[in-house]
Amino acid sequence: MAIVIKGDNNGIAVEGSLKIEHLDFEFGKGIKSVSGVHATTKEEETYDEAEEIIEEDNACYDPLSSDKAMAIWQKLRCHHLVDKHNKPLLSQPKAAILAVVISQKLDLNPKWTFLEKLWGIEDLATLHSKAKERNYYAALFKEYSNLLS
């Protein structure tokens, strides 16, 4: 089976799932032709469904609750850098510096998302960039890194 697309190339309306083996595309002109089009079977969709389930499980994972994170939070509480809810007791620029150190220690990916959610601070990346311009940045970064080593 083959599909040849002519005209304005605004797309194809398809009901259900398809597997496309070959697609001819010309830069500036769009899709010229499509071939090897097959309706997918339930067997072919099994992997996709399993992948979705894994992604949903990962959505529940919180790296800020891991054993390694708990040790970090304990140190930070002892030094009065975070409260009992692990929220910073610092200005936002200093919290952004702490966030990048925590992120490095826990290998967070994405780097900021988990801490932004926990702390209720938006755009830690921008706060961190601005904090880099402060004269205390290097010393504070080193202090936090040493504390969490």
Image: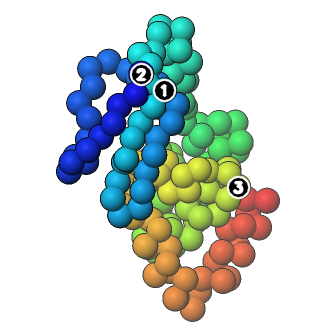
Q: Position of residue 2 (x, y in %)?
A: 40, 28
Seen in the picture, residue 104 relative to 8 is either above or below; the reply is: below
Earlier in the chain: of badge 2 and badge 3, it is 2
> Which of the image's four quarters has the C terminus?
bottom right
- Disc assigned to residue 36: 1
Residue 91 placement, left or right of 64: left
Q: Residue at x 54, y 52 (%)?
A: 110
Q: Which is more foreground, mark 2 or mark 3? A: 2
- Callout 1: SS: strand
Badge 3 vs badge 1, beta-carbon distance below 8 Å: no
Find the residue positioned furthest to the bottom.
135
Q: Position of residue 98 (x, y in %)?
A: 58, 65
Q: Please give the residue where the numbered disc 2 appears in the rendered image.
A: 1
Residue 144 placement, left or right of 34: right
- Callout 2: SS: loop
Query: Dot 2, how many residues are within 10 Å of its Cα: few (below 14), some (14-19), or many (20+)?
Result: few
Q: Position of residue 100 (x, y in %)?
A: 59, 64
> Which of the image's four quarters has the N terminus?
top left
For the image, the number of numbered tags is: 3
| Depth order, front residue of 108/55 | 55
Badge 2 vs badge 3, beta-carbon distance below 8 Å: no
Earlier in the chain: of badge 1 and badge 2, it is 2
- Disc assigned to residue 105: 3
Badge 1 vs badge 2, beta-carbon distance below 8 Å: yes
What amino acid is labelled 1 in the image?
Answer: Gly
Q: Residue at x 50, y 73 (%)?
A: 128
Rendered image coloring scheme: rainbow
Q: Residue at x 26, y 44 (%)?
A: 6
